[in-house]
Amino acid sequence: MEETMPKANWRAAVSRAVGILVFLTGALLAASLCIASTPTDHSVPSIFDAHSTPAESIRHLSHFVLGVTALIFLVVFSLLSYALVKFRSRRADAEREPAQVYGSTQIELAWTVIPILIVAVLFATTARMIHAIQDAPEPKGAVEVTAIGHQFWWEFRYPTLGIVTANELHVPVSDPSHPTPTFLKLLSADTDHSFWVPQLAGKTDLIPNHPNETWLDPHETGLFLGQCAQYCGTQHAKMLLRVCVDSPEDFRTWVHEQQQPANQDEKEAAGRHVFESTACLNCHAINGTNGTGRFGPDLTHLMSRRTLAAGAAENTPENLRLWIQNPDAIKTGSLMPAMKLSDTDLDALVRYLETLR
């Protein structure tokens, strides 16, 4: 019995060391995948793939913090491994008490001063980064957007351009030689939300009656995916947002198109009548109609957006029809009511909405 106990202790120590090594290898592999991944329209956005000044600042800070914590881990793991090997239980020492050491001033100073210095450096670096992002001055020519979080969709208003849209934020690319950042004022219409586009900026909360601000200056064109990062109700997970970074020419074209009145195709007058004579107008607005609702997205240029229900479905006639007829089939628990229209009225309404580009 006395001979088998040290062997059992040794095996336990080895298994623990192997487990820690496996965990460390997995963590490093996960980090490398995040860094190396190339985002697509269907991939998970990574904070390590930054395309805007705020996101780059956060990435640099995260690399610094990961480096410091990795160094701490290696030092602690090395000391632990040394102690496991050097002071492992031996049969010859079974009857002896290890040497006792008390009152080592050097050791006590080391484990007190070094952690304080590490925390102070991390705190100062983080505070400097937060100040650089939050207190950045708004330059002349910056695009101003008011982003309003609703359950469970995003409303975007461009006050100086007279544009109201939903779920898809269009901003111009910011050339370093001609910076054109976008400054967002963040509001909430109901509960707490959080605006987060990992590749463009950090998380910023939208709190009722407490306006917040953030900004981004994308360095290249493309589509960047975002998410409400604060649990806000049943469909929090499907409160997605899309940031379309356009070239200066494409952004001007988009602005011009969004400033146009809604299409008044007389061929679809029946569908327009359905919209104006049902509960649709209580929640939605369409320029040129008597619909001025604010509870739901503005539909003036509905078909210019690629998705419905805050990214829950592609914006196709089939999905649009299903969304009006039975919203729970796409987004269970959403506040969009089922309209209970007849097939004739539903078809007419869908055809009318398809003209709103």
Image (cartoon, rainbow, N blue to C red):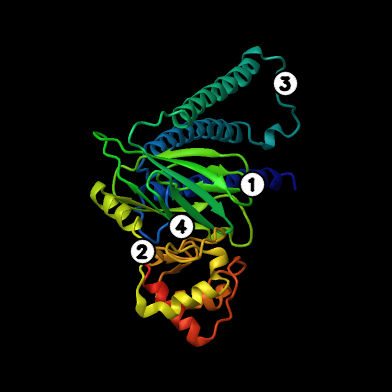
Q: In the rendered image, is residue 318 in sight?
A: no
Q: Which residue, given by chain and number where applicable, does mark 3 sit on?
A: 100
Name the residue at 27% across, 54% down.
253
Of mark 1 and mark 4, the one earlier in the sequence is: 1
Q: Which residue, given by chain and number where applicable, does mark 2 sit on?
A: 304
Q: Which residue, given by chain and number where applicable, does mark 4 sit on?
A: 166
Mark 3: which amino acid?
Gln
Q: Are marks 3 and 2 in contact (CB under 8 Å)?
A: no
Question: Closer to the camera, 317 or 10?
Answer: 317
Give residue 182's quadrant in the image: top left
Of mark 2 and mark 1, the one earlier in the sequence is: 1
Of mark 4 and mark 2, the one earlier in the sequence is: 4
Taking 343 as reference, is 168 left or right?
A: left
Of mark 1 and mark 3, the one earlier in the sequence is: 1
Which mark identifies residue 89? none
Secondary structure of residue under mark 2: helix
